[in-house]
Image (cartoon, grey):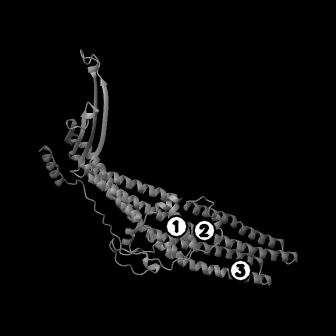
Amino acid sequence: MVMRSLTLGIAAALLAACTVGPDFVRPTTQVPAQFARAPVTDIAASAPAQSATDSAPVAESAFWQGFGDPQLTALVEAALSANHDLRIALANYDRANALLRGAKFDYLPTLTASGEASDARASADQQPGVARADRDGKSYRAGIDATWELDLFGRIRRGVEASRAETAASAADLQAAQVAIVGDVARSYVELRGLQERLRVAESNVANQRETLRLVDARYDAGRDSEFDTSRARAQVETTAARIPALQAQVAVTMHRLAVLTGRMPDALIAELTPQKPLPVLPARIDPGTPGDLLRHRPDVAAAEQRLHASTARIGVATADLFPRFTLGGLIGSQAIDSGALFERDSETRLVALGIDWSFLDIGRVRARIAASDADAAGELARYQQTVLQAMEDAENTLVRFDRARDEDAHLESAAIDSARAAQLARVRFEAGATGLLEVLDAERTQLQAQDAFADGRTRSASSAVALYKALAGGWPQTLPLREAVGRR
């Protein structure tokens, strides 16, 4: 009868249970219908924002494949499977998942099994007049204890809710790490090919200028030019040649960076990357989607939202301390003075208890914890809003840089072509005696500057495309890296 009444009382209490604290509501963010810089990038008119369930990615599933460079694709895939920063992020995600599983166990009773066997003897002073043999005593005990917190006010539910949100934030952090690593690989690869092109330009110009120096030396030997002319021509050759060591060092440093990004020793890719290749082909068009798409795709925004969710749930955890905490305890066991009688019927023991813990005199500390949780939530809300603004700023900046880089390339290409033609004509005129050495040297110097600027500009254009993909969070891997691939490394 007692057990039946207790069970009915608990069931009624659970049915009447409530969850204290505020429920999380996703913050409403007012964003424009389209990006301010979208029209200048030859982008189709943006469609209205879709819902989170039917939104389409703003770029291909693997954007780097659009550059048409198998070597870049191989490096990206190697980084996704072996980069150590990704392994750290994956471990953090696994940890958050484990903590979530642990938090869910709070819904269930905690069971412990115990056993004890004792052989005791009381002293003559403790039992005066009792024979020594009668002062000996043996005892055997075995039992199973159970304790269960009745989550009447949602303390456990809010704790699990907070853990679930933290796990989602950790998953978003892992995706953000993927975005960063893939972006670094693509940018470093583009910079490597650009540096190699600039190195080729410098070496080609050194060869041309040495040919000019050979011609000046021949004219000097024939008495047609002065030593002043040969010194000027030699000085220009040495000045141009001085560019080469610095460019070679930058090439080596970039190769080392790519190797480390793919989880290998710095010298692992030198042989593979030393052969020069052209810069990856830029995509003709990149669709940025809408600002609403951006906020759904950016993992840093998702992580900030989930951390706001977790801090909101923790307000409920703190608020639950204002109410009493009910705990149901139970014991089923057996106790006997003889091991053979331990599990006999008359050795049975049991206990059912309902505990109440209510620190109502400690309301001041509880309200202080609630206030601290409120402040944490306010801070996370501000952090979320700041993350949204930074994401919008990042997208707008990269859109305008990508657009302007394409225009810059067109001018630099024309300058490089014209300067090469001018340098060729200056040498022809110099050999014919129609112009002086100064014009030739000036034309060659202009040619070097124009060709180097064009190679550098094309590198920046390709880098701006990578930065745009990164800012839009489109075309990035939206799944967790394979543990099998990580483990093989």
In the depicted structure, whether residue 101 falls above or below residue 349: below
Q: Earlier in the sequence, mark 1 or mark 3?
A: 1
Q: Element under label 3?
A: helix
Q: Which mark is residue 77?
A: 1
| Mark 1 and mark 3: Cα distance apart in space | 44 Å
Q: Which residue is mark 3?
A: 423
Q: Element under label 1?
A: helix
| Mark 2 and mark 3: Cα distance apart in space | 28 Å
Relative to 68, 31 lies left or right: left
Label 2 sits on what residue type? Answer: Leu
Label 3 sits on what residue type? Answer: Ala
Relative to 276, 304 lies left or right: left
In the displayed image of the protein, which residue is found farthest to the front? 340
Label 1 sits on what residue type? Answer: Glu
Q: Quadrant of residue 419?
A: bottom right
| Mark 1 and mark 2: Cα distance apart in space | 18 Å
Quadrant occupied by the C terminus: bottom right
Q: Earlier in the sequence, mark 1 or mark 2?
A: 1
Q: Which residue is mark 2?
A: 192
Residue 290 seen anywhere in this rendered image of the structure: yes
- Residue 21 coordinates in the image, percent (x, y): 24, 54
Give the residue drawn at x 54%, y 73%: 462
- Residue 426 coordinates in the image, percent (x, y): 73, 81
- Residue 55 coordinates in the image, percent (x, y): 36, 74
Give the number of the mark in front: 1 or 3: 1
Nearer-the-camera pick, 154 or 114: 114
Q: Which mark is residue 452?
A: none
Nearer-the-camera pick, 464 or 70: 70
